[in-house]
Image: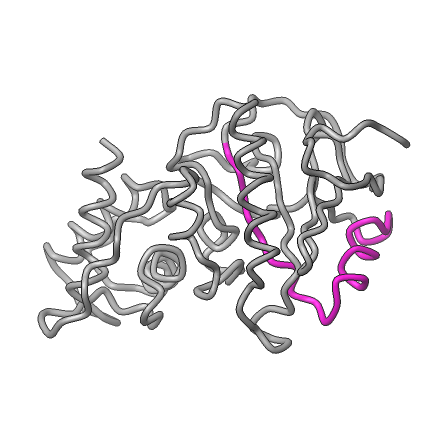
Amino acid sequence: MSFTADSKTATKVVASLNHDERDARIDILLLHYTGMQTGDEALARLTDPAAKVSSHYFVEEDGRTVQLVPERRRAWHAGLSSWRGATDINARSIGIEIVNPGHENGYRDFPDAQIDAVIALCRDILARRTIRRERVLAHSDVAPARKDDPGERFPWDRLAAAGIGLWVEPSPIVSGRTLSANDRGSEVEELQKKLTRFGYAATVTKLYDDNTRMIVTAFQRHHRPARVDGLADVSTRDTLTRLLAKRA
């Protein structure tokens, strides 16, 4: 299947057969890292029909951008996931795979040329699509129990400076009340309600359970990357509160 690239930033098309019909309006831009040893290995997997996985775009470390699936089609990149009650994230998102070996294979900083290309691609997509800034998301946001990508080294602040995504400068890490495993009560309830309001699938149990810890970890990877430990310290909770206020 050949097609013409949707984005003017794509240098070429390498068609993947791993896609199907959409049945929802596109309203999420979802960022991933490849999590494999090399970009070539990742590209081969994303275009292998047996793998049953794909994305719309693929950004090399040197900034070259490849389109794999037409935007009008439902690429298979998000897996089991949810955001603000929606569970078929593939049906409503455009997926971008960014070459990086990931946490299991020598996670490293993203080169400037690559981030410049990601910014250019995102801006091109957002200029053509109605996607709210708070719906530019990490894979770990929509699948916090399964995924870590694109991780705490991804420079969300640089994207925000270019008008992409919802961002506030993270609150400084200071001493104070920290919510952690098996804590119970109204403070945990308030945290869970705020995480749910933000978009995460956080069940309000009033118990700081494993699900809450995984969601806090995902939130930190995206919005408070200086320390990713799954503990809801003052900095994490204050950053969440400020993000909710900015989104309103």
Q: Residue at x 31, y 49 (%)?
A: 203
Task: Give how far across and how far down residue 236 sits, in percent.
Answer: 23, 60
Magenta stretch holds residue 197: no
Left or right placement of residue 131 versus residue 6 in this view = left
Q: Is residue 71 above or below residue 37?
A: above
Please tell me which residue lies in front, 33 or 78. 33
Please tell me which residue lies in front, 77 or 132. 132
Q: How many marks?
A: 0
Q: What stretch is highlighted in magenta?
A: 28-51
Residue furthest out toward the right: 1
Q: Which residue is drawn at 61% across and 31% down?
A: 91
What is the quadrant of the C terminus in the image?
A: top left
Magenta stretch holds residue 37: yes
Q: In this view, does 10 lie above or below 103?
A: above
Q: Which of the 4 image quarters holds residue 41? A: bottom right
Q: Which residue is drawn at 63% across and 22% down?
A: 23
Task: Give how far across and how far down residue 220 sits, in percent.
Answer: 34, 61
Task: Give how far across and how far down residue 114 sits, in percent.
Answer: 61, 55
What is the quadrant of the N terminus in the image?
A: top right
Q: Residue at x 81, y 62 (%)?
A: 40
Task: Give how far across and how far down residue 55 sits, in percent.
Answer: 69, 44
Q: Which of the 4 image quarters holds residue 99? A: bottom right
Task: Say how the picture is coloured.
Answer: one colour
Left or right placement of residue 61 versus residue 112 in this view = right
